[in-house]
Image: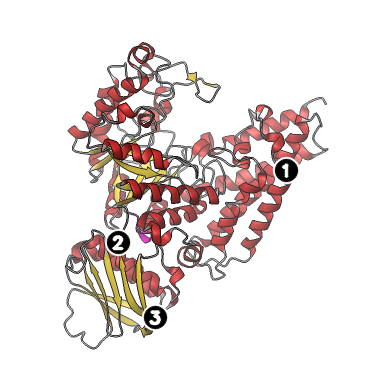
């Protein structure tokens, strides 16, 4: 047994000098609540089989004296912390004692990890429980990429292996509301039947599937349709706070009386499909508030008052339907006087995705006001193609430390898909694993190296190299020079076909150093030996991501020359166009291996088409 197969690392471990060789046939006794534990027991059964152990399940320990076996007690008086467990290994038997069935499932998960090295297990005692009672992951399904049910179920299995107990699907327009087909029909949405099935799948793994529907800002995909345009705050667009203008409607207007009945109708159809008692209503980034129909109200009463009034109306809808409201706290936290006026039964979601995000100050503000809150870092995988490893780990470490210090009730790791979600799913595994670790026990996992666990347990890489490649690829952003907010240089370049001439940092970027870093990191792909079911797909995804990064390095150098007045080298534009087409074709095929077709062409393929058009313009320009 190698302790590196454990993740999250337990908070208390006492190893002995002895080991026990488990038999090829092992009895596992579920003393109580096997009705709730059976799915977890069967998952353990499958994990043990990979170690050469055939597990037989039973609810009776009669006749097992003197025979090595496992006893699982999910309601033990010996453990008094919710979701906690004790795992004791001695030569005669292995005992998992837990405070509740979830804790017993987590104990079985830890035992399964111990078996990763085979049938020989070290004797000792593990005492473990989580820092954060709710440890979640939110996956964006509103930027074109809606995973298939098979993909979602595999993803949920990964979360269960990491002891995650909350899952959300970030939704703007990708639930198939019966009365609103024009909003979702092009996007292969989640149906009510699929949500019910996924909800059950999650519950069997002690994961709470929390409904998520944005309800204020981020409603463009609704408001662009004539039937909903009257509800827009600024139907003709608005000025962005960082400069520039967006020419589409964006937020629901708090001054439009039909908005609340509209939301009530959405909630009445959406919520019955979920068994969770929580509901994330979004309400973040209301950038256009006060620029349209609410201009006079904001001028008279202040932005915070108008925002809070609408938030309270939404809160009333949620409580009337028996749920606890979660909402993104980025708007309200700017106004401490408004934070103090929040109902005490809400949960604010304090989000920020840079390593230096002010979690300390923001968490303290919610704590002073007596408002329950989560800390919500992110995987840094969006707008980067292969992630930003150092930033992501620093972001999560800070969130966990300050959240725990100030009494956060939850930790929600976010996987966004800004501008088309072109990054491939495995890119998120490393930051997801680290986030799960620090949200379970931050002190035990602060400096945890998740790479051995991922290579062995998730990717089943006999070379134990793949997680190191992901780690290094995710740090290649450091070589480019400029540090960008919420993006890497190459990620930003990929989405800048229309604006690259005005992109001020372009001349500062070191595309030679970036290319060298990518090639050095990607060389490790030649060593990997993946034995997981998705192994061939994962390798093709990562190789295509690397191919796109190298193409963008060449593109960046070409554009730097053009900015200085030098035409592209002969044939350079042709080569870039051809390579873009090859990478785009591979991307289209890879996308459909995990995701539904809706949104692929309109959103994910858009940057490829934009750059092909821009390069043709450069090609035909008279220099």
Q: Are marks 2 and 1 in contact (CB under 8 Å)?
A: no
Residue extent of the magenta highlight: 160-164
- Corner quadrant of residue 466: bottom right
Left or right side of 571 for 609: left
| Residue 236 in the image: above or below residue 409 | above
Precedes in sequence: disc 2 or disc 1? 2
Measured as percent of width and height from the top left, residue 191 is found at 33, 41
- The CA distance from mark 1 to mark 3 is 51 Å
Tell me if mark 1 has few (under 14), some (14-19) or many (20+) residues whose alpha carbon lies within 10 angstroms of its own.
Answer: some
Depth check, front residue: 619 or 329: 329
Q: Which residue is mark 2?
A: 129
- Corner quadrant of residue 70: bottom left
Residue found at x 25% / y 25%: 313
Residue found at x 52% / y 42%: 382
Residue found at x 73% / y 34%: 559
Measured as percent of width and height from the top left, residue 584 is found at 61, 43
Left or right side of 274 for 383: right
Asked whether residue 608 appears in the rendered view, the answer is no
Q: Which residue is mark 3?
A: 119
Kindly report which numbered mark, 2 or 1, lies closer to the viewer in this rendering.
2
């Amino acid at each position: 047994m190698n302790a590196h197969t454990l993740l999250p690392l337990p908070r208390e471990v006492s190893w002995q000098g002895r080991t026990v060789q488990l038999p090829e046939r092992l009895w596992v006794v579920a003393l109580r609540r096997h009705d709730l534990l059976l799915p977890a027991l069967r998952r353990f059964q499958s994990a043990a089989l990979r170690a050469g152990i055939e597990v037989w399940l039973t609810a009776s320990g009669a006749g097992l004296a003197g025979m090595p076996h496992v006893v699982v007690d999910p309601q033990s008086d010996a453990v008094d912390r919710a979701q906690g467990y004790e795992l004791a290994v001695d030569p005669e038997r292995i005992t998992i004692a837990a405070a509740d069935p979830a804790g017993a499932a987590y104990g079985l998960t830890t035992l399964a990890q111990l078996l990763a090295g085979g049938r020989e297990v070290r004797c000792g005692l593990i005492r473990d429980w989580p820092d954060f009672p709710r440890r979640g992951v939110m996956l964006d399904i509103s930027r074109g990429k809606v995973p298939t049910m098979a993909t979602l179920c595999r993803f949920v299995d990964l979360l269960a292996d990491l002891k995650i107990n909350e899952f959300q699907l970030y939704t703007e327009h990708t639930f198939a509301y019966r009365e609103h087909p024009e909003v979702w029909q092009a996007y292969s949405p989640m149906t009510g039947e699929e949500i019910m099935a996924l909800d059950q799948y999650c519950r069997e793994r002690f994961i709470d599937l929390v409904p998520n529907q944005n309800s204020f800002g981020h409603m463009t995909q609704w408001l662009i349709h004539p039937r909903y345009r009257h509800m827009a705050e600024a139907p003709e667009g608005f000025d962005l706070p960082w400069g520039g203008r967006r020419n589409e409607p964006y937020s629901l207007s708090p001054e439009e009386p039909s908005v609340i009945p509209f939301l009530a109708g959405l909630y009445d159809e959406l919520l019955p499909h979920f068994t969770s008692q929580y509901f994330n209503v979004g309400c973040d980034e209301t950038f256009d508030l006060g620029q349209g129909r609410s201009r006079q109200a904001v001028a008279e009463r202040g932005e915070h008052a108008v925002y809070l009034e609408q938030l309270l109306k939404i809160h009333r809808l949620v409580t009337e339907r028996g749920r606890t409201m979660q909402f993104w706290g980025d708007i309200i936290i700017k106004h401490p006087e408004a934070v103090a006026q929040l109902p005490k039964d809400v949960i604010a979601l304090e989000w920020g995705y840079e390593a230096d995000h002010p979690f300390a100050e923001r968490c303290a503000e919610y704590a002073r006001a007596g408002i329950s809150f989560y800390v919500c870092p992110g995987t840094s995988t969006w707008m980067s193609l292969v992630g930003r490893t150092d930033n992501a780990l620093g972001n999560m470490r800070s969130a966990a430390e300050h959240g725990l210090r100030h009494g956060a009730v939850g930790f929600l790791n976010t996987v966004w898909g800004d501008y088309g979600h072109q990054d491939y799913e495995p890119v998120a595994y490393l930051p997801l694993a680290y986030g799960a670790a620090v949200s379970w026990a931050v002190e035990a996992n602060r400096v945890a190296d998740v790479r051995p666990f991922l290579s062995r347990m998730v990717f089943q890489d006999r070379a134990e190299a793949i997680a190191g490649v992901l780690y290094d690829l995710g740090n290649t952003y450091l070589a480019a020079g400029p540090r960008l907010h919420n993006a890497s240089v190459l990620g930003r370049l990929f989405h800048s076909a229309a604006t690259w001439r005005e992109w001020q940092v372009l001349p500062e970027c070191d595309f030679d150093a970036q290319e060298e870093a990518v090639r050095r990191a990607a060389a490790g792909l030649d060593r990997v030996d993946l034995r997981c079911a998705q192994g061939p797909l994962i390798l093709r995804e990562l190789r295509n991501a690397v191919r796109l990064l190298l193409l963008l390095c060449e593109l960046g150098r070409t554009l730097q020359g053009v900015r200085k007045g030098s035409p592209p080298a002969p044939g350079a534009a042709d080569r870039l166009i051809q390579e873009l087409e090859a990478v785009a074709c591979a991307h289209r095929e890879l996308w459909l291996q995990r995701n539904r077709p809706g949104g692929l062409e309109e959103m994910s393929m858009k940057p490829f088409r934009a750059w092909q058009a821009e390069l043709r313009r450069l090609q035909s320009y008279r220099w």
